[in-house]
């Protein structure tokens, strides 16, 4: 006789709410003792050691009820905002359904339905592999490209970021992430947009493909106009593949469903997505590809599990992904990213001539980079130089901190040793959030250009810490 279903309520006395109430205040100590001990140290140093009580949409709230505008979206994960009711309901529904999930030897409907929806936005692609993260989506693309072409080498772009597992790290263009983890795969970097460098590497005849972010997350650098189309033609001429890493740029972030769609005629052979597909709840990654590639990898029944993932295609992740795609369509968030992003970018770009420390504002949709540079006035040049000698990127950090401390806006420096702030807010932001950010940013720039005050005092602290840490 089958066991009866579990009764509602706590099992074996476990109460999550009670545990959080009892131990939640230990959050920073627990991390320091048991996880990455440098994380709480860093947060304490820059004053980011906040305690957030709840979140919704594009906002957090602390224990005092003060709101914080989220211009980071969990590094892009919270594309439809935090705790979207449609995604929440989908997850409650899938849990309540008690599906026979991950039996491994059946075909559940949800993965097929999510693949169908994703492919509807990618009409030149045919099949999907579901994994658990962006880096896993990239790993899948690297493996599939190598197997399908029979070639060992992948090309990538300098300053690229494709993940931190060993294969993805081999195509990571930032040395700071790679140092100390050799040996890596024998892959090769080319400058973003350099077709001559691409042609030279393809001439060796051992290249399986080029993996590229249409807009690089590190520094927010867009591929030059025409590069992706020309690179695709070169690659195909040499029987190599174009791999588009849309882990951060995909699902509407840049004002189109994919960032590569900004350029006519670009049809990558493999496309990687993740982050926003999760709805911020259940990790999920997807690698979309052409039929012939999948059929070559899975060429016989003997190879049916030659590439798989233990938690890939799980019901919770698939339900979250379906809900996210529904929200993107129903709330027209891709169009909102395009319109609101242009409003935000143009408002910030108008400040470049006003502030000598502000050098460039760039990006597409709701993926915007704000770059700082050497000032022209003698008064500020000395202060800037002192920061640069200590560690490049300190000025951008000086801007990020008062945005949080004084204006309750969460942002990030767009990579180590970069004087660039990246804005990647949830796609639900609108005119109110644009006004709030531009007003706060203007106030911070006014203080920076005054040459004194708490902001530059904090800069002195950062210089001392940078020098001490060498």
Image (cartoon, rainbow, N blue to C red):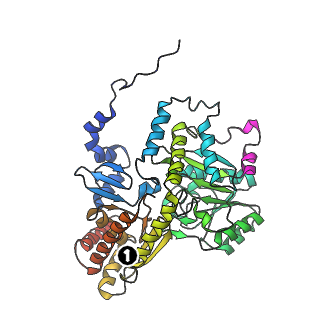
**206 relative to 158 in the view: left or right:** right
Residue 59 point in image, percent of width and height: 35, 55
- 383 or 289: which is nearer to us? 289
Q: Residue at x 68, y 40 (%)?
A: 306
**276 relative to 130 in the view: left or right:** left
Q: Report the span colored magenta.
A: 290-308
- 318 or 248: which is nearer to us? 318
Residue 164 point in image, percent of width and height: 52, 54
Q: Specify the quadrant of the image occupied by residue 382.
A: bottom left
Residue reaching furthest top? Answer: 1
Q: Quadrant of the C terminus?
A: bottom left
Q: Which residue is mark 1?
A: 388
Number of residues whose C-alpha sits closer than 10 Å to that of mark 1, classed few (under 14), some (14–19) or many (20 or more): some
Report the number of numbered marks. 1
Residue 266 point in image, percent of width and height: 67, 65
Q: Residue at x 73, y 56 (%)?
A: 151
| Label 1 element class | helix
- 60 or 92: which is nearer to us? 92
Question: Is residue 129 visible to us here?
Answer: no
Above or below residue 292? Residue 158 is below
Question: Is residue 144 visible to us here?
Answer: yes
Q: Residue at x 32, y 88 (%)?
A: 378
Q: Is residue 307 magenta?
A: yes
Q: Specify the quadrant of the image occupied by residue 200.
A: bottom right
Residue 270 point in image, percent of width and height: 66, 55
Q: Is residue 465 magenta?
A: no
Q: Specify the quadrant of the image occupied by residue 418.
A: bottom left
Above or below residue 104? Residue 114 is below
Above or below residue 349? Residue 297 is above
């Amino acid at each position: 006789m089958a066991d009866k279903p579990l009764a509602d309520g706590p099992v074996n006395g476990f109460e999550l709410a009670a545990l959080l109430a009892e131990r939640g205040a230990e959050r920073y100590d627990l991390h320091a003792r048991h996880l990455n001990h440098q994380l709480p140290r860093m947060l304490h140093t820059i004053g980011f050691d906040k305690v957030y009580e709840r979140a919704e949409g594009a906002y957090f709230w602390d224990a005092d009820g003060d709101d914080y505008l989220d211009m980071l979206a969990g590094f892009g994960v919270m594309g439809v905002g935090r705790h979207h009711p449609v995604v929440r309901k989908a997850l409650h529904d899938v849990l309540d359904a008690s599906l026979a999930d991950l039996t491994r030897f059946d075909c559940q409907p949800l993965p097929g339905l999510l693949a169908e929806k994703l492919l509807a936005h990618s009409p030149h692609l045919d099949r999907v592999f579901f994994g658990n993260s962006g880096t896993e989506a990239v790993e899948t693309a690297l493996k599939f490209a190598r197997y399908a072409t029979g070639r060992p080498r992948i090309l990538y772009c300098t300053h690229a970021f494709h993940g931190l597992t060993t294969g993805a790290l081999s195509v990571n263009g930032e040395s700071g992430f790679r140092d100390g983890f050799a040996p890596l795969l024998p892959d090769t970097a080319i400058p973003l947009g350099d077709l001559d460098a691409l042609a030279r590497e393809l001439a060796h005849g051992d290249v399986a493909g080029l993996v590229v972010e249409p807009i690089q997350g590190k520094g927010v650098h867009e591929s030059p106009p025409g590069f992706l189309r020309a690179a695709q033609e070169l690659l195909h001429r040499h029987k190599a593949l174009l791999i588009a890493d849309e882990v951060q740029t995909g699902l509407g972030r840049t004002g189109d469903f994919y960032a590569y769609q900004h350029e006519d005629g670009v049809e990558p052979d493999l496309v990687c997505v993740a982050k926003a597909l999760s709805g911020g709840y259940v990790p999920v990654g997807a690698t979309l590809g052409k039929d012939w590639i999948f059929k070559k990898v899975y060429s016989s029944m003997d190879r049916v599990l030659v590439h798989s993932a233990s938690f890939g295609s799980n019901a919770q992740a698939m339900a979250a992904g379906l809900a996210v795609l529904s929200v993107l369509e129903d709330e027209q968030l891709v169009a909102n990213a395009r319109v609101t992003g242009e409003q935000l970018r143009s408002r910030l770009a108008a400040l470049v001539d006003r502030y000598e420390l502000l050098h460039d504002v760039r990006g597409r949709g709701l993926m915007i980079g704000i770059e700082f540079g050497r000032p022209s006035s003698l008064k500020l040049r000395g202060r800037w130089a002192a920061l640069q000698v200590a560690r490049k990127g300190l000025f951008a950090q000086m801007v990020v901190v008062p945005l949080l401390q004084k204006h309750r806006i969460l942002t990030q420096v767009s990579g180590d040793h970069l004087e660039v702030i990246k804005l990647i807010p949830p796609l639900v932001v609108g005119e109110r959030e644009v006004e709030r950010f531009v007003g706060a940013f203007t106030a911070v720039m006014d203080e920076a250009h005054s040459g004194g005050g708490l902001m530059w005092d904090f800069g002195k602290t950062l210089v001392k810490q940078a020098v001490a840490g060498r």
